[in-house]
Amino acid sequence: MRVLLLPDENTMFFYLILIGLLLIALIVTHLKKYPDLNKKKTAGFRLIAVCSIVFAAYYLYWRYRYSLNLEALWFAIPLVLAETYAFIDSILFAFMMLKPTDRKTLPPHESASVDIYITTYNEDPELVETTMEAAQEILWNDKKVFILDDGDRPEIKTLAQTHGCQLITRGEEWRGKPRHAKAGNVNNALLQTSGDFILILDADHIPSPQIIKNTIGYFQDDKVAFVQTPQHFYNTPPGDPFGSDAPLFYGPILQGKDGWNSAFFCGSNAILRREALLQLGITEYSRTMVKQAKEKISAMRKAVYRFRPTDSIEKSFALELKKILNESGKMLKTGKPVTKVFDEIRSTLSKTEFAEKYPEAILPGLSDKLEAYLEITRGDEAIPILPLATSSVTEDMATSIRLHSLGWRSIFHHEILAQGLAPEDLASALSQKLRWAQGTIQVLLKENPLTVKGLSIAQRLQYFTTIFSYFSGFANLIFILSPLVFLTTRIAPVTSYSAEFLWRLIPFLLFNRLMFKYIARGTNVRRGEQYSLALFPVWIKAVTSVLLGRNPEFVVTPKQRQGGRFLNLIKIQLICIILSCAAILFSIIMIISGTPYSYMGLGINLFWTIYNISNLSIIVKAAVYSLPEGWNPRPDPDLNRSTI
């Protein structure tokens, strides 16, 4: 019994070999049941994911129960918490990929009318013109091309007229009001156009002629709100030094989310149903009005509660007002329209018998004060209906949450049907990634998918998975510093580095890596893995800045390379590299001088230190990267390539 509960090293090794052979046999047997290649891939992933989670759970149980170094809890606790974060992240990833979609193009219904929106603010007119020309070449009869110029530039107006496009800019109603960047630009256009569907393109995204034909068929399902296609960049430098491409996200990840009806609207290269957006705008308008009404009833209650009766008439007056306001609050909770609730308050206060019973002199100015509270407007906004969410700089994700909460469906069509421009320098790339991360954390605070009504449990988890990933910066910082502590102090976060430790760690790491590699096979995700670690200061800044109340502004990503070196932007990564190299050198000197080390602990920590240096170095290379001489990328003439 003792051996079963606490096996020695040889017994543990035997158990792991036996379990590994059994799992291989199960995988091979299980896959034979699925002749379809995609189903085989999914079935194989499920088995690997289960193995990964089982070994990870066993490892963490052992870490918490037996291996914490109680004499260095200041070190042991942060590391095991970081490992726990990685474990939860793996579970969420595994759940996301349990039933990925493999969609095929559906026949289009030719009767649909499509408005093509090209959103622009300060992009080069030549760039916008290229997108205009490509939009006019889209193969669809009933289409109109609109240029949404938030910069209101004369040269863009001239180009729009030249190419037969219609121009939409902001009107006077927006003067002095919140503009809401791209979301406000699109919302402004939605109220001035009438197409059944809207294709949204960024100014630099050149669409394929087939983009509508290959996606519009999905809308035969009346509950589909939008169809998202991948974002692909034709100017990515050799080796993708800035981590611009996201083949894992615009492939397996969105296919996995699509299986749970949780594919995101990503802001561009997507077709949306006008009806869904307008319903969302009206619903949000109603929610805003109800929220405002509740706040005003609360304010009226406070005004009444501040009144201190001096006689029985005044006391009776205050009690009756409180009763009216309490009943009004209950009516709002039952879903009664705001206007009717407030009309009833007005009606009660204006009745002759009420006025005679309680003359206004009891509380001077009461009528005017309550009448002001009873005015419900959206005066802080230029337009009352705001279909695209304006609560976050990542308006696309917030809009997706709202649409899904109303019961609409989404589709991810895994085919490149547009290609755009990625940042060509590290400063622009980091600015873009920081904005995305900050916007995602804003969504957690303002559109929390864990509490929004109407989402399924699976949808809540899919949105939370994306949000949760941006908290990895804290865990990665711990993973970078932990081996340095051991190499320089010989203090270990575990009771001992032994074979017992390795028997538990290695299967956990192997199956975890196998799970990610298996789902990403055929896709080059190495650069994404490197940046996942190297960008830890960006993720930490995004989380802390938003949680501290510093809301980011929407900034258009520069479409042209910004000159210079950018080492000043990666000071923290450089410090980590220098400290890592110094820790390695220090440990070598100590060994030469005869200082005793745990050689297994030394090997493990040297391995992780070198691994971290390798990943961090990629961002140093990006900071000093120069584009190849004569670099002049051109769009791929063949846009109808599948990403599969």
Image: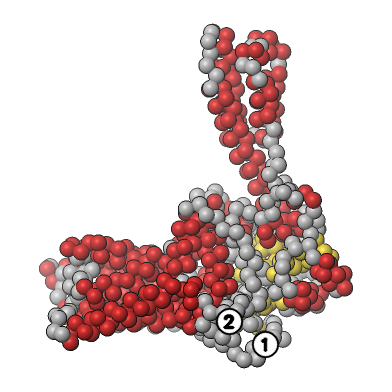
What percent of the width, then of the height, locates residue 59?
27, 69
Q: Secondary structure at mark 2?
A: loop
Taking 234 as reference, is 485 above or below it?
Answer: above
Location of residue 27 (image quadrant): bottom left
Q: Is residue 399 left or right of residue 162?
A: left
Asked whether the viewer can see residue 37, the reply is: no
Q: Is residue 311 left or right of residue 127?
A: left
Circle on res. 644:
2
Q: Are marks 2 and 1 in contact (CB under 8 Å)?
A: no
Q: Residues within 10 Å of mark 2 (few under 14, many from 20)?
A: few
What percent of the width, then of the height, locates residue 53?
35, 69
Look at 67% across and 70% down and name the residue there: 269
Look at 77% across and 77% down and name the residue there: 126
Amino acid at dot 2: Ile
Circle on res. 277:
none
Of 129 and 628, nearer the camera is: 628
Q: Is residue 266 left or right of residue 623?
A: right
Amino acid at dot 1: Asn
* Count of marks overlaid on the render: 2
Mark toward the start of the polypeptide (2 vs 1): 1
Circle on res. 632:
1
Look at 66% across and 14% down and name the residue there: 360
Q: Secondary structure at mark 1?
A: loop
**Residue farthest to the bottom?**
629
**Residue farthest to the top?**
312
What percent of the width, then of the height, locates residue 481?
32, 71
Query: If the image is split into quadrants, where does the C terminus sit?
Result: bottom right
Asked whether the viewer can see residue 597, the reply is: yes
What percent of the width, then of the height, locates residue 300?
59, 27
